[in-house]
Image (cartoon, grey):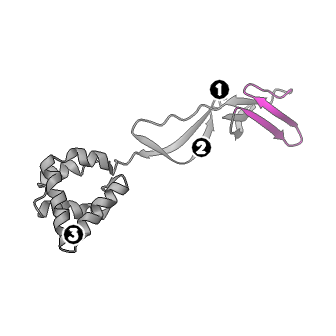
Amino acid sequence: MLALISTGPFALIRTFDGSIADINIPDKWQVQRVADGYQTPDGKYKLVTVVPFTVPGGQQTTGSPTYSINTGTGVVTQSYTTQPIPPPTFISFQTFLSRLTATEYLNIKKAIASQIQANNATVALWYDKVGSNRGIDTADPQTATIKAAAVTASLLTQARADIIFTP
């Protein structure tokens, strides 16, 4: 990213995506395909590389970037507003299955078969959706309902459910 600055005093005129820019300063200069370090013949304007923003660990950017110039040095920096990265809410189906003991898995499959025989496909449908979606979204209210139902039906203890359903 490049920035066009005036050199005396330093002031940010505009920014350009990429490393090559076409500059049009009305009634002054018009040049095409210039790169970092280009300076107008009169020395009043030049192109500088923008110092890119570094996202702090555990943060993500929000909104559009802003640019500022150090009026003492002419260095242009990019900045963003940041916010913490939200905690994950997704568990892959493979991870979900790997957390189940053989006994827990067998009990869940037996419960599914039993409910299907009783013409109730609620748990079977949820299980198949989890598999076809490749996982579980723990932010989905239906996940909390299924987790509670598994504990109520003694398919999982609360402690095991908490482990299995944690992203």
Q: Residue at x 15, y 53 (%)?
A: 106
Residue type highlighted by circle 1: Thr
Task: Find disc 3 in the rendering and name its residue.
Answer: 116
User: Marks 3 and 1, Cα distance to the nearest angstrom?
Assistant: 73 Å
Does 140 sit above or below residue 25?
Answer: below
The amino acid type of the residue labelled 2 equals Thr
Q: Quadrant of residue 66?
A: top right
Q: Tell me which segment is drawn in magenta.
A: 19-41
Q: Can residue 45 be seen?
A: no
List x then y, in percent, for residue 36: 72, 27
Q: Which residue is mark 1?
A: 73
Q: Callout 2: few (<14), some (14-19), or many (20+) C-alpha neighbours within 10 Å?
A: few
Farthest residue, direction right? 27
Q: Nearer the viewer, residue 22 or 107?
A: 107
Identify which residue, 85 or 47, lies in the foreground: 85
- The residue indicated by pointer 2 is 66
Q: Position of residue 31 (x, y in %)?
A: 85, 34
